[in-house]
Image (cartoon, rainbow, N blue to C red):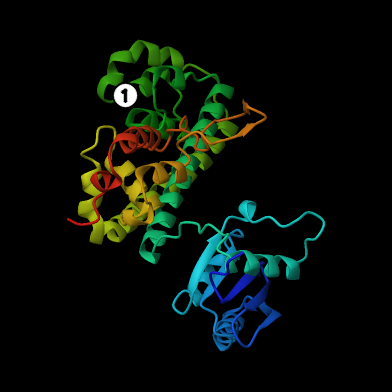
Amino acid sequence: MQVLYARCAGLDVHKDTIVACVRCVSPPLHQEVRSFGTTTTELLALADWLGEHGCTHVAMEATGVYWKPVWHILEPEFELVLANAAHIRNVPGRKTDVNDAMWIADLLAHGLIRSSFVPPQAIQQLRDLTRTRKQLVREISQHSLRIQKVLEDANLKLGSVLSNVLGKSGRAMLDALVQGRTDPGELAALAQGTARNKSAELREALRGRVTEHHRTMLKLHLQVVDALQSTLQELDLAVGKALAPIQQRARLLTTMPGISELTANVVVAEIGVDMTRFPTSGHLVSWAGLCPRSDESAGKRRSTRVAADLSDDRDGVGNGRIECWRRLKFDPPMRALPTQI
C-alpha cells in the first residue's frame, strides 16, 4: 500500500500519559515508541522529540477533552489529524497503549484516517460559550419542574393556569408564597398582563395547603434560578463579544425562515464560517447527523435514523436545525453561510 506520509507519528492520549510512536520510512528508516506525561513541560518535550525525528503529520484519537491540550501545543508546528476512535479501532485482543500508538501511526502513514472537523480557536471558544448556555437553560428548566413539584405537593395548581410559573405573574405569586402570604384572592391580584383575565381560575388554583417546608423548598429553588439567570445574562454578553468579528455573517443566517438570532449563533459556533472545510452541502448535512446513515447487510437495510435528536427544541435550536437541513439539501453552503461579505 502506498505510503503518503514518510515521517509521521501516532499518539495514544490518556489523562496522565501519552504514548507516542514515530514512524519514518525515509532514510534513516526507524520506528520508535516513547511515553510522555500530559503536563505542559512534557507536551513541549513531546513536540521537540517529534521535531527531532522530522515528523510532518501527527494523528491522535479524540479522547474526551484530553486531546485538546496536546492539540494546542502541537498545532503550530505539525499538520494534525484528529481521529474518531470508533473509526480506527484496532484488532480485538491486541489492544495495548503501545500497539494503539503504532496502529494510529500506520493508518496515518497510508492516509487511512479521516480527519475530524476541528474549528479555529475563536470558533472553539464561541462553541464552549453556546454549549454552556444550553446547559444553563436546561438547568433552569429542571428547577422550574422542581418548583412545580413542590406546588403540586402543596396542592397549588398554578402550573395548570399559567403557561410559565417563572414568568412575571408566576414569580410574583411565588415570592409572595415564600413571604408567608397564602390568601388566594391576594395572590391572584398579583397577576399581570393577560393573566388578569384568569382571576377566578387563579383564586381556585392558589387554594391549597402550604407549610413552612414548602416555603423553604420554594425559596431554595428560586435562589438557584436567580443565580442561573444572572449567569445566563453574563454568558449572553460573552457570546456577543465573541461574535463581534463575525456578527454580520451570523445575521445573514437569520434571513432564512425558521432561523432566530439564537439559532444563528449556535450554527456559527458549531460549523464556523469557513465552508471550504465541507466539499459539498451533503458533507455538512452528514457531519451534523441530519441525514440517514448507510447500514445495509445481506440486502437488508437496518436502522437509518438520524444521529441528531431534532425533537428537543427546549433551547430554540431544533426548528432551526430542521430548516438548515431542508435548505442545505437544495442550496450550496456558500449561499447559506458566505465566507466573504
Q: Position of residue 251 (x, y in %)?
A: 22, 47
Q: In what quadrant of the picture does the N terminus appear? A: bottom right
State the residue in front, 173 or 276: 276
Q: Position of residue 149 (x, y in %)?
A: 56, 27
| Residue 66 seen | no
Q: Is residue 309 left or right of residue 284?
A: right
> Is 51 above or below relative to 306?
below
Q: Residue at x 40, y 17 (%)?
A: 161
Q: Position of residue 185 (x, y in %)?
A: 37, 17
Q: Quadrant of residue 164?
A: top left
> Is 103 above or below relative to 20?
above
| Residue 194 seen | yes
Q: Quadrant of residue 190?
A: top left
Q: How many marks?
A: 1
State the residue in front, 58 or 231: 58
Q: Residue at x 43, y 34 (%)?
A: 314
Q: Is residue 251 left or right of residue 92?
A: left
State the residue in front, 163 or 181: 163
State the residue in front, 315 or 78: 78
**Residue linked to disc 1:** 191
Q: Is residue 220 left or right of residue 174?
A: right
Secondary element type, mark 1: loop
Q: Residue at x 45, y 42 (%)?
A: 286
Q: Which residue, as the protein is rendered here, is positioned at the far right?
A: 93
Q: Which residue, as the protein is rendered here, is positioned at the far front?
A: 1
- Answer few, some or many: residues within 10 Å of disc 1's Cα (few below 14, many 20 plus, some between 14 and 19): many
Q: Position of residue 115 (x, y in %)?
A: 51, 59
Q: Residue at x 48, y 76 (%)?
A: 78
In the rendered structure, which amino acid carries the disc numbered 1? Ala
Q: In what quadrant of the picture does the C terminus appear? A: bottom left
